[in-house]
Amino acid sequence: MKIKRREDPYREEISQKRRADLISALEEIDSREKSRLRAAIPFEAAKKMEVFLEEKGLPRRQGIQMLIEYGLSEENEKELENLESERKSQINYLYGNYCRMKFQAYEFLMENKALAMKLIFLLSENQSLKNRLKGEGLQSYVSQDEWDNWDETVIDNYYRKYVFASRL
């Protein structure tokens, strides 16, 4: 005959309290880092959320936290799509301005090249007109300009700088 030992009910109560205290301590540590939120949502929305989380392979608790944190609602997706389309249109506008300005810079470069190539001809024509005014006695109308004293090295430097694109 076996004697059944009866455990002390008081001892059982103490172990349950310890376990409950341990669980509450862990929950308290967890709650210090996070806020708890209780919300009543329609059953259909909960099912949709559950299906979505299963498709993404996320556990329920972490998935719901991520959904709340990142706000993956349809309204936010539409807003993100609108922002993306605005950003693309702004990029296209900026690229259009860039292309226009690049073309204008190229046009100015070509005009500078053309002026540099015409420089010798324009200087000689200017000098001949000044000589003609001097010959007709209109010395007072002839102005002294800075390019009147230019020699071939100054003109060659302009040729190298603008026509041959050599930086000095």
Image: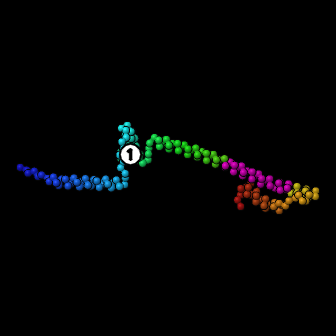
Point out the image quarter for the C terminus: bottom right
Q: Residue at x 36, y 42 (%)?
A: 40
Residue 147 against residue 65 in the figure, above or below: below
What residue lies at 71% left-to-right and 49% top-to-bottom? 107
Q: Going by the image, does 115 lie left or right of 23? A: right
Image location of residue 98, percent across then percent down: 64, 48
Task: Tell me the SS state at disc 1.
Answer: helix
Pick whichever, 87 or 125, lies toward us: 87
Tell which of 61 and 108 is nearer to you: 61
What residue lies at 83% left-to-right and 56% top-to-bottom? Answer: 123
The residue at the point 18 percent across, 53 percent down is 12
Whether residue 67 can be seen here: yes
Residue 105: percent from the left, percent from the top?
69, 51
Tell me if 69 is positioned left or right of 94 in this view.
Answer: left
Label 1: how many Cα within 10 Å (few below 14, some 14–19, many 20+): some
Q: Where does residue 79 sit, x and y in percent of width and height?
A: 50, 43
Magenta-tinted stretch: 101-126
The secondary structure that most of the magenta stretch takes on is helix
Left or right of residue 90, residue 131 in this image: right
Residue 58 on the magenta segment: no
Identify whether 79 is placed above or below 127.
Answer: above
- Give the number of marks: 1
Q: Which residue is mark 1?
A: 64
Quick one: which residue is furthest to the top in this view? 44
